[in-house]
Image: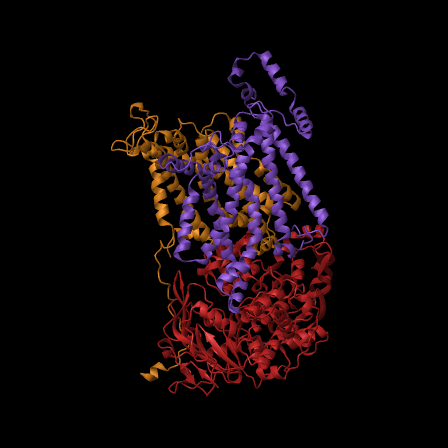
Amino acid sequence: MSDNRFTLVGMRPVDKQSPQNTKWYKGKPIFSIVLFLIIVLGCLFCELFIPQDPTYMDLYNANIAPCKKFWFGTDTMGRDIFSMVWYGGRISLFIGFFATAISTSIAICYGAASGLAPKWLDAIMMRFTEIFLSIPELLLVVLIQAVLGDANVISITFVIGITSWVAVAKVVRTEVLQIRNSEYVIAARCMGAGFFHILNKHLIPNFMSSIMFMVVMNIRTAIVYESTLSFMGIGLSTEIISWGSLLSLSEKSLLSGSWWIILIPGIFLITSLLCITDIGNYLRDRKKDINGIKRLFCRK
Amino acid sequence: MINKNPYLYYSRKILIFILSVFLLSIAVFYVARLAPGDALFSYYGSRVEKMSPKERERAEKKLGLDAPIHIQYIRWLENAAHGNFGISFKYKTDVLEVIKERLPNTLLLGGIGFLFIFILSPMLGILCILHNGKWLDKLICKVGTIISCIPEFWMSLVLILIFAINLKWFPSSGAYFIGREGDIWGRILHLILPMTVVIASHLWYYAYMVRNRLLREIGTGYVLLEKSVGFSKRSIIFKHCLRNVLPSYLSIMAISLPHIMGGTYIVETVFSYPGIGTLSYESARYKDYNLLMVLCIMSGTVVILCNIIAQIIDERIDPRIRESETARIMEVSDV
Amino acid sequence: MQAILEIKNLSVSFNTAQGELQAVRDVSFSLNKGEVFAIVGESGCGKSVLCKTIMKLLPDNGFIKGGSILVNGTDITNYCQKDMECLRRKVFSMVLQDPMTSLDPSVCIGKQIAEAVKICNPKMKHNAIYNRVIELMTLVGITNPEYRYKLYPHNFSGGMLQRTVIAMALASEPKILFADEPTTSLDVTIQSQILNLLKDIQKKFQTAIVFVSHDLGVIARVADRIAVMYAGKIVEIGTSEDIFYNSRHPYTWGLMRSLPYFAKNGEELYTIPGMPPVLINPPIGDAFACRNKYALNIDYEEMPPMFKVSDTHYAATWLLDKRAPKICPDIFPPFVLHSCTVPDTRQDEKNSCNISTDTLLDVQHLSQYFKLGKNNVVKAADDLSFQIRRGEIFGLVGESGSGKSTVARCIMNIYKPFLGQILYKGINICDRKQFFKNRKMLQSSRQMIFQDSASSLDKHMTVADIIAEPMKICNIKPKRGSFRNEAEFQLYYVGMDKSYLDKYPDELSGGMRQRVAIARALSMEPELLVADEPVASLDVSLQSQIINLFKHLQSEHGFSFLFIAHDLSVVRYLCDRVGVMYKGKLVEVAPVNELFENPLHPYTKALLSSVPIPDPQREMEKTMLEWREND
């Protein structure tokens, strides 16, 4: 026995000990994702479960507190708040996503151009963004709205999109400047890579991960912005139902003490915003794990 | 851009400042006038619709709206050089008078709010760091995140609902009790709710930033060395980390000043607080050109000034940037 | 003599997302007053963690799993941070690896040292503190201390900063000084000065020093006793002579033998095959068994205990068990036989075979200047001229700031030189017209390998894409069918199998990444390969693998190789001719043997004499030439 144990055997491949399988869902904001999915799906398919027609104004039943018939109560024009909240969510979320899509596209183009441009052009482009930022937001919105005519979903989306691209553009520019001087881009240039090759293969995949977090936060900002604008009266009119226009009626309800018109849609809005924030925070913390998004969906 | 000659440095900055304000004024002037909408509406109200073309012409001449835009601008510039900024179409008084009445209210609200944020956010950030990893830090982060998600107008409404209407502790609108403008206590009571909203909606953003920067500082090498020499974590944070975070904090605060002060218009609207926030909104909506110009230039000036101050802080006070060697490479070959 | 520090069966673990990482496993040693105790090991073996644990400076997710730490007889294992602060002020001190980040950039260095003094002597008056600071600065060799008191860290070089850190460490007159790789990031000449300083301190103040390093040469110079660590355990411990002249553990053998210094003429460098284990689920038996040529069956089943070789020398290997077979390893470092004066016949053989007299690269009067601010111009390269022939390995040596990277980048057309010209195959690559005319050829026949493999590979591309990239850029059809097949072939050539094709760079270790970079460079079959410090950031055993790879590939393909390094022993092993750079100037160029045996320029002489030799006796006998420079 002891002889056997002390024989010279040399190197033997040892079975690779795989790391303890931690549960795949650990660390991921599962609760927020699930909740947000429920909200989104509910808004998209609300017709399947809402009891009343959200646009139907039943003045007889105006200003009723939450009860069995109207789960969230009714507003000053007699519409069922429960139905309106789900139905209006569509528009608010739509505006949120598409406005962010517009602002992100502008930001990427502008930021990448500024980062790749020669120094003098870069300086001018940055000065321009500063002046752009110094014009009061409200003025821009009002004026652009005036140009576009009556506020509707598309125009609001457009307006929000073209006023909120600056912060992301600055981040894109910083990232591009950094990536431009990194060694793998230098290596690619030594090999003879052209401008577009570097742009597509190296620049874009790399700064996308940095701005993911900001993009998600922008969705949140866009939704809040829309509701603020509608509340102030320069956004959607009360005929088009969104969370913002829903809340624009709430000022009057203060006097009548109908708390449900203020509180309930607000809580709905805040919950969605919190879910988005949570997902955004997760993306930011995972930024270090560059390919984390790809790996998000596969378990090792 | 560190010149040895401070005079040259500062005069350069002043030049950029004046140029930027000038460009801003041109931009606002043109944009305001080119946008569709009827400027006469703000002066004459609904009578505009009933005016005959001849009356319109006369009205336009009276208000100086008949000439082409660049002539209007030059006229305006000449008048402005003499201190005459025109009259507000809506209020029919001198623009400066209108602003003078309301400016102090906004300054109170925005200014004191900014001071509170300036002082409270580092305190909150440090509190989080001192208890980093423990329940207090996590609780503050969660609560802060939730509060930062609440839209300003909604928060205002809810506060009015609870404190003004149900509990009746504070008034729900206005800046002072009617007739008692000088009553300081009355002013304070009126300020509390709107200021709470202003502070609550911005505080967490800056506190979180301070917290994250401090967290980054704590991870650096010199903190480890200080610990090994025998300093306690507390003294390292206060003596060293804060000092290193301070320049970037100051420059960010400089940029946020106009943002906070200019962002009071929502709060002013909900609380019917007579400040220049609501004034700007009205002048933009109803094309009250003269008022709009002055307000835009005022706010634009503050923004540009604060940006320049932030740049100066960045360049002169932060020692890392001040002396860091940024080699200007003499031509990266465009192969 | 009672030991001032005693570690008994210490185990330290970290809580990570993947589970518990056992960084230190069952370590025991003791430290006596006034001795230098060195801990040697590669990255990941747990030596830094050990130091930080004793000083209780672990990050939040680290904890002591078991064992005890005794300082002067007192058990400090369960001390809280407050008690440790007292200890840190009076007994312990630490010197960290990177002096650039170890100091607060916004406080002048005099003040930082003063703070360190104050915290140990809270009642000292202002004047007394100032005097003490000047005294400490003079002690560590900072000249002109009154003037330098007011300067900031960014005004200083690495060597001066490290002296400042040592001054801060000495402020408390510590009994134990922990030095965690203090000279790794410093130049060779500065390194020898700092090592001398540490030895001085040991003599003057009888301070015990725990010196952690991976460099055996440095250890040979300073250490009295040595512990070799692998995978969280001490595998061998003994005096300097025991370890260098009579080592008993196969890992120590492998470590010594992998050094280029011990390479026998012309032979391949010995390498330790395989990789260190991941310590999340450490193997049951001896962690080194799967890389050990001399492993026994029992090595895979049970961990070896510490066997006594002599009173001072212990080793944890089953080979020392009575029942184990007696082996006479051929990889025993031949200290007695080897001597630096043995002529290297390899060079002459090689000369006749591969190197032609054709000049491939001709650098003529190259100058490159950088502007730092208005009045400050740095001459990164100053009137450099040299040639590289076909099939030759040319080494370019110099310390940091000497301009070697600048030269490499000028040759690769990354920078446009200010003055001078570079002729590649007769074409002047600095001239735009000529460059564009021969663009395709130039871009494929010259390739570069960078130092930091992590940043030279795009994190978002898979290995297959990275290797195929140059071919895609130059629109070359893959010879073996698809780009993927091509990539597989190149990987095979550098010793990696095709399972790596779909991995991302951050999933690979440093050595693997560097191989991928090499595969990418070689896929274009270049005639000139420029490598900018390719092995500097790798461990010794990985270094030897990559160097062997370079040698093998060069002899097969026959490309010319510009090898830039600061490690002279590697250059000596690999290169045919060497050029020495100092502050932008090329001070000496000679065939490798000539340069090392008979250096002409004083800087070369100083450089060669400061290189630490992994042989304690020779280190002691060596007289060091000081190269005085304005710091």
* B108 with respect to C349 (left or right): left
Q: Say which residue appears at 40% left-offset and 85% top-offset.
A: C325
Q: Is residue A272 visible?
A: yes
Above or below for A68 versus C227: above
Above or below for C239 versus B299: below
Above or below for B174 versus B252: above
Image location of residue C4, percent across then percent down: 48, 80
Q: Say which residue appears at 48% left-offset and 78% top-offset.
A: C227
Above or below for C317 versus B2: below
The chain displayed orange equals: A
Front-most of residues C264 and B118: B118
Front-most of residues B51 and C423: B51
Q: Please identify which colour was used for chain C in the image.
A: red
* C102 with respect to C283 (left or right): right
Image location of residue C75, percent across then percent down: 41, 76
Q: Say which residue appears at 39% left-offset and 26% top-offset.
A: A239
Q: Please identify which colour was used for chain B in the image.
A: purple
Image location of residue B30, percent across then percent down: 61, 28
* C582 with respect to A10 (left or right): right
